Image: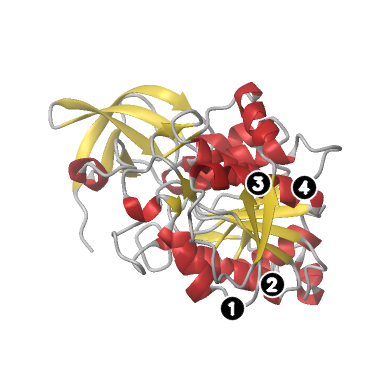
Amino acid sequence: MECSVQWGVVSSMIHDGPHRQELVVQVGGEQAQAINYPGLTGSCQAGDSVLLNTTALELKLGTGGWHYVLAIQGRERSLSRQGHIMKLRYTPLQGRTLAVEEEDSPYHETMAKADSLHGLPVAVGSLHSMLAPLAWTFHQQGKPKRLVYLMSDGAALPLSFSNIVSILKERGLIHSTITFGHAFGGDLEAVNIYSALLAAKHVAQGDAAVVLMGPGVVGTGTKWGTTALEQGIYLNAAAQLDGQAIAIPRLSEQDVRRRHQGLSHHSLTVLTKVVQTPVYVPMPNYFQTVFPQSRQLEGLRHRIVWEATEEGFRELFQAELSFSTMGRNVEDDPLFFHGVVAAALFLARLT
C-alpha cells in the first residue's frame, strides 16, 4: 500500500466541528480542501502547517476531493484515559477506544451476559445512501421508535465523515450509533458485528437496527471484489443471534451498468452465495412495473415480501433531506428509493 504525502498550510475554515473540521489549505502553491479529525490529530487553526495525505485527490477517487490531515506541526496529542481496544491497529494513526464490551466499560457485565437479540429486527444493506431514506420512512410509521445505526468498516472509517448521520441524529431519526471493526466515532464502539448487534439491543435499547457501511463502497466490477458483500455476513450474524434479518435490496432502473439494473448483481450474490439461512427480502410492487419480465427473484430461497411503496416514495419529497445514490436523486432513479422504502416499511411493521 502506498500513499502520497505533502505539507500544506491552513488558510481558512469551512466547517469547525468537534469531530470533523473542513479546511482550505495551500498545497504546492494551489488551494485545496482538507478534512481534519480532531480526535486523531488535534484541532487545526488558520496558519497551521499540516502534513496531508493527498492520495485520494491525486487518484480522482469518487470519494476524493479532500486531502486528510495526518499531523499538525508543533502540536502534540495526549491519549484519552479510556479504553484499551485499538482501532486502525499498527498504523501511524492507531488509537485507543473504550469498547462497549471490554472490562473497563460500564456495560461490560451487560455485554458478558448478552447472547441473543430476542427477535430484534435488523435491516442490512450495502450502500450508505440507503440510511437517510430508510430512517425517514421508518419514523413516519406510527409512534416513535428507537432506530440504532451500526456502521461497519467496509468504507469510510470515521463516523463523522458522514454529514447525514449527524443530521439524522439531530432530527431524532437515529436514536444512537455504534461503530464496529475499525470504524470509529459512534456513541458506542464495538469489536465486531456480533457485539455491535448485542449492544444495539441490550445497551442502546433499540427497537430496530440498521447495518450499513459509511460513504465510499469499494467495487472492482467483479462478482466477489466488493465490500458490498459484507451485507451477507451481517445478515448471517443477525440470524445467528436470534434477530429478524432483513436484506435491503439494491435496485436500480437507471444505472448504466447492466449488472446493477433491476436487482443488483451484488444483492444476488449476497442472497444466493453468502447468506446461509432464509432472510426477509422486502421488494416494492414498483419493481414489477419497471421489470415485468424479470426472473431475478426466481429460485431465491428467501422470504420475499411485496410492499406497496407509492405513498412512502411520495413522502420522501416532503422530508427536507437530501437523498441521492451514485449521484442520482429520487427523481433520477426511483426504483432504488422504492426498494429502500419497502425495507423501511417492513422493518417498522416488525417493531
- Between discs 3 and 1, the one toward the N terminus: 1
Left or right: 110 in relation to 219: right
Q: How far apart are labels 2 and 4 at the CA level? A: 18 Å
Check if mark 2's residue and mark 1's residue have beta carbons within 8 Å: yes
Q: Position of residue 101 (x, y in %)?
A: 69, 68
Please report whichever mark, 3 or 4, sits nearer to the chain's N-terminal start.
3
Could you tell me which secondary element the residue under label 3 belongs to?
A: helix
Crowding at mark 2 (Cα within 10 Å: few <14, some 14-19, many 20+): many
Residue 243 placement (x, y as % from top left): 74, 67
Asked which colour scheme the image uses, the reply is: secondary structure
The residue drawn where x is 20% and y is 59% is: 2
Amino acid at pointer 2? Ala
Q: Is residue 91 above or below residue 301?
A: above
Judged by depth in the image, the label closer to the viewer, 2 or 1, is: 1
Q: Secondary structure beneath disc 2?
A: helix
| Residue 155: quarter of image | bottom left
The residue identified by callout 1 is 276
Q: CA distance from mark 3 to mark 2?
A: 20 Å
Q: Which residue is mark 2?
A: 239
The dot on residue 348 is: 4
Q: Mark 3 sits on what residue?
A: 342
Name the mark nearer the viewer: 3 or 1.
3
- The local crowd at label 3, few if under 14, some if 14 to 19, many if 20 or more residues have their Cα within 10 Å, is many
344 or 39, nearer to the observer: 344
- Front in this rendered view, residue 12 or 268: 268
Q: Amino acid at mark 1?
A: Gln
* Amino acid bearing label 3: Ala
Q: In the rendered image, is residue 26 in sight?
A: yes
Question: In the visual, does 60 lie left or right of 222?
Answer: left
Disc with the residue nearer the chain's start (3 vs 2): 2
